Amino acid sequence: QLQLVESGGGLVQPGGSLRLSCAASGFTLDYYAIGWFRQAPGKEREGVSCTSSSGGSTYYVSSVKGRFTISRDNAKNTVYLQMNSLNPEDTGVYYCAAVKRPWGLCVPWSIYGDYWGQGTQVTVSS
């Protein structure tokens, strides 16, 4: 079965950190660009960060730039999202998505559709 599984979400106080993981099973991520998306209550899903298949190109939405870091370990078939200095506006369900894209940038967000994870909840609250 081909799937992506997110983990690492939870409840954290403002200013805290979390590291999300996106693990692939049933296929290898080597030729896939990976994106992290989030959906806050009552809002549309938005792209947060992404990495190209090689990891050589990354992108961050302005609201998380300087606080979030995306990385990938193809040997472990896993992509990570390190989130620091979290604030309540970061609350939401975080999803990872994969698109087969052996070269090129990891944007625009509309390219993602091959695989989606089930999401992991991140809640930032005191």
Image (cartoon, helix red, strand yellow):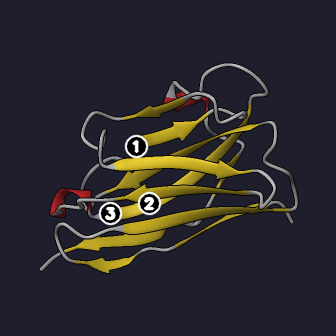
Circle 1 — which element? strand
Label pair 2/1, CB-CB below 8 angstroms:
yes
Residue 112's image quarter?
Answer: top right
Label pair 1/3, CB-CB below 8 angstroms:
no
Q: Where is residue 125 in the image (x, y as percent from the top left)?
A: 16, 76
Mark 2 residue type = Tyr
Q: Is residue 86 left or right of residue 17?
A: left
Q: Mark 3 points at which residue?
A: 92
Circle 3 — which element? strand
Quarter of the C terminus within the rendering: bottom left
Quarter of the N terminus within the rendering: bottom right
Residue at 24% across, 40% down? 63
Q: Position of residue 117 (x, y in %)?
A: 61, 61
Q: Which of 38 and 63 is in front in this view?
A: 63
Could you give the CA–CA distance between mark 2 and mark 1, rounded to whole angstroms? 9 Å
Residue found farthest to the left: 126
Mark 3 residue type = Gly
Mark 1 residue type = Val
Q: Which of 22 and 108 is in front in this view?
A: 22
Mark 1 or mark 3: which comes first in sequence?
A: 1
Residue 118's image quarter?
Answer: bottom right
Q: Mark 1 points at which residue?
A: 48
Q: Mark 2 points at which residue?
A: 94
Q: In the figure, 118 relative to 65: above or below?
A: below
